[in-house]
Structures are given as structure tokens and as C-alpha cells.
Amino acid sequence: MGDSISKNLNQNVETLNSIFKDCDDVNYRFIEIGDNNKTEACLVFLDGLIDKHLISEYAIQLLLTNSKGDDSSIISLKSNLLDTLAKESIAVPGVEEAESMDEIVDAILSGETILFVDKASKALILSSRGWPTRGVAEPETETVIRGPRDGFGETLKINMTLVRRRIRDPGLKIKTTKVGRRSKTEVAVMYMEDIVNDKILKEVNKRLDEVDIDSVLDSAMLEHLIEDNYISAFPQMDSTERPDSVAASIYEGRVAILVDNSPFALIVPSTVGTLLQSPEDYYSRWTISTVVRLLRIIGIFLSALAPALYIAITSFHPGLIPTRLTYFLGASRINVPFPAAVEAFLMEITIELLRESGTRIAGPIGSTIGIVGGLIIGQAAVEAGIVSPLMIIIVAITTISGFALPSYELASGLRVWRFILMGLASVLGLYGIMLGIVVLSTHVARLESFGIPFASPYSGLGLQEGDLKDTLVKAPIQKLQLRPVFTFPKNKRRMRKR
């Protein structure tokens, strides 16, 4: 538990001075309590992490005012001094007692204020967190045409509140813990007690307890530490900036993990079906959402296979395409000095460089570089005879298909496999592509997310129960009477039969 608190006020201050040596932002405010029998006290806090107005008005001012002229309520070695102060002289929202220096240090670094009183063997932790925060704003990575506009920020308490607003049910449980030996980052686990599967919840808590690292600075770092297969290019957790997405997932029996200092929440378990869903699917007409979901599935195949198919057909199997198209393709490549494989890799790498440079440059300049750079380089490459016009079309379709996927991490994983499939197509043609598809399918089928098959419901889990009604297509809300089967919820029904 660490060193205990001394009854000597000066010794406690000296101990904190040694722990926070060369930390000029740690402040010590000495005051005297009582009128006739004065008792020395000290408030310790970290400048910049506390609400100074709160501590000044509801702690220091009340301590000084209430202690004048009435020593009976302040000090009597026979009475519990700290309990009297907490109940009669301090008006901050939260007050706790601390018995060890470890608790004191953690509280100071978390933005709390500590009250030491001479001759007291304990200290009071006063709730005073009040650092600058970013206001609730619209999510930048998940925009929707129709739906809520609020998004998560970097403050855990605010993020928890945004979810709590949408789930006014005492069954919503929030368990907090700290991760990181040095950073002591607060992590909140949110779930519905009467819906969530106990095995999934137990596995989440177990993995969080097993994290042993100096610091966790963002939810992405925590994701990499607790996911099933960190080698895979595909994400095994959903990440979102939207409170409504988190609330909807919790209603389905999934578990949400919120990390302090991160605007992204993690949702487990995750499957291919959930990664292809967008919040807007549930705010639009079911017919439109169904068509859009089918387009996303087409986008997956185009994003992964289009360049590889171009290489295979052009280099190995030109007889598979119509004769007139073969003549056109041959004529467009007359002046191209490179094989189709080199041509495809050259353009794909160029597009990836443009994408990366546009991402790193903030504001409108970044998007301008991406658009103008793509147009200029594509046109110049065709006129210079480096690539064929058809290759430009293939690259454009591939890039647009990747942007159609709701999950950026899933699209990034497909980008990695795109180059693998292109390499196999360059060596073995269509046989190489088939070999790559078999390996990719096997890899996806073996992946799990907290014990749940990553490929469900396409892998068979939930097919009989009708999970495809909310994955492959989007059925009307009246038909979605049951919760998804892949979460194995305790309470399976979410709507009465109609």
C-alpha cells in the first residue's frame, strides 16, 4: 500500500517535495484552521489540472470562514477531525479519505486536491478535476447525413455521459480501471448487465488486467495490446467516435471500452459484418441501406482484386476477355515500356504516397494535393507513355472502392492484401490470385474477436437465426426483433412480435 501518512504535517509535505522534486507545477497552499487553537493545514494540487474556482470557493474559503470563532467543530483530539471537516466545512462534490502516500500521489496526478491537517493520520482527497477540454463536436471520421451530430472528445467523464444520455437504464454498468504503470490511464468498461454474455465480459476484464506497459496514450494502443491476433492486418475491434454507435452496440450485448485522452471508443466483439455497418444504415430507409451494403461488399472485392486481375489478364490470360477489348488493350499499351505488373505497382505506390501526403497535411491543402496530384500525375504518366489509360481507370476504381468502406482499419488491411495479391498475380496469374484468396479466406476464418469468430455470420454462426438480415442486407426495423446471435446475449429479444 505504500508509505503511510504521518501525523506531522511538515513531514508529509517534505515527502511530497521529494517525490515531486523539480516539478514546479505542484502547488502547496498552507492555511490555519481555528481561531483560538489554530491548527495548520495544507492543500496540495497540480496547477493546470484542477478547477481553481471550485477549490477556492468551496474548500479554502469555507475552511477559513467556518473555523473562525467556533473551535468546537474544528479540533478536538478526541473527535474525528477529518470527518468533521468533510461534513461541515468542505462543499466540493466528492471527498474521500486516503491512508497512504501512493493514493495521494495518484490522486494529485489525476487532478485531485489533497488536504493535509496537522496531527491527522489520514488525508482528504477533494474532487477538483478541471483541466481544459475540447467541446463536444461533430465526429470528423464518421460523418452522416441524418443522425446525431455529437462526438466523443478526450475527456473520459464527458464520453461516459454522452453514452449514459442514450441509455437511461440502471442495467448499464460502468466499471473503471487504470492501465499503464506510469501513465495510469483511466479505462471504462460499459455494458448492459442483463444482456451481455458473461464469458465475453470476463475475457475483456481479464485482458485489461493482464496489460503490463509503461503507458497507454490512446485507445489504439490498448486495442493492439488486447486483441486476439496482433499480426493480422485486419482489426478485431470496432472503433468509433459516435456515442450513438456505442449505445446501439451495448444494446446488442457488446462491450464498449472507453479510454481517457482518446476520442475513439472500442467495441467488442467485432466481426466482418459489424465492420461493414455504418450508423447511417439505421437512420436511412431500409431499401437504401440494403443497396449501400451490397455496394460495400462489391467495394471489398474491387479494392482487393482489381489491380491483380488487370495484371493476370493482361500478362497471362488475354484470351479471357473479348477480342475487341483485347485489341483496344493492346493498342493502349503499345508505347508502355513496362510490363503490366511494374505498371500496376508503380501507380499503386504513387497513389499510396499521395494518400499519405494528403493525410499528413492538415486542412484544405491536404485534399487539394490529393486531387490535383492524382489528376496531374495520371495525365502526365499517360502522355509520357509510362502507363496505359486503362491502368489509370483501374487505380481510380480501386481507390474509390476503398473509400466506400465504413471502417478505415478494414480498408487499410485490404490495401496490404492488395499488394500481396498483385505479387501473386505477377508470378502465377489467375492461379496466384486463387491461391491468395484461399490463404486470405483461411486467415479470416481463423480470426477471432474475444472468442467470437471474426467471419460470423458468414462463417455459419447466426445464419439460421437470421443475422444476415442485418449484415448482408438491412431488413426493416420491424423484422429485427432479435439481437445478433454472435454476441450470445442473455436477453435475445429486443422487440415484441408484430
Image (cartoon, helix red, strand yellow):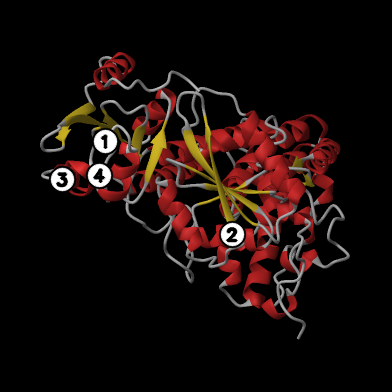
Residue type highlighted by circle 3: Asp
Instruction: Locate residue 78 relative to residue 482 in the image: left or right.
Output: left
Asked if disc 2 and disc 3 are in contact, CB closer than 8 Å, the reply is no
**Quarter-of-image position of residue 440:** top right
Q: Distance between the residues labelled 2 and 3?
A: 46 Å
Mark 1 — residue? 76
* Secondary structure of the residue carrying numbered label 3: loop
* Separation (CA) of disc 4 from disc 1: 31 Å
Q: Where is residue 320 in the image (x, y as percent from the top left)?
A: 83, 49
Question: How far separated are the C-alphas under marks 2 and 1?
Answer: 44 Å
Disc 1 on helix, strand or loop? loop
Residue that label 4 marks:
51
The label on residue 172 is 2
Check disc 4 and give the amino acid type: Asp
Instruction: Bin the neighbour count of mark 3 within 10 Å (Cα to Cα): few under 14, some 14-19, many 20 and up.
Output: few
Q: Residue at x 75, y 65 (%)?
A: 491
Mark closer to the observer (2, 1): 1
Q: Which of 269 and 52 is in front in this view?
A: 52
Q: Position of residue 103 (x, y in %)?
A: 43, 29
Q: Residues within 10 Å of mark 4 (few under 14, many from 20)?
A: some
Residue 149, by quadrant, is bottom left
Task: Look at label 1 and name its amino acid.
Answer: Ser
Q: Answer with mark 4 or mark 3, whichever residue precedes in sequence.
A: 4
Sequence-first disc among 4 and 2: 4
In the visual, does 128 lie left or right of 400? left
Q: Residues within 10 Å of mark 2 (few under 14, many from 20)?
A: some
Identify the residue at horizontal 83%, vertical 32% (top origin): 428
Give the residue at the far front of this rendering.
Answer: 78
- Between residue 212 and residue 341, name the one nearer to us: 212
Q: Earlier in the sequence, mark 2 or mark 1?
A: 1
Quarter containing the C terminus: bottom right
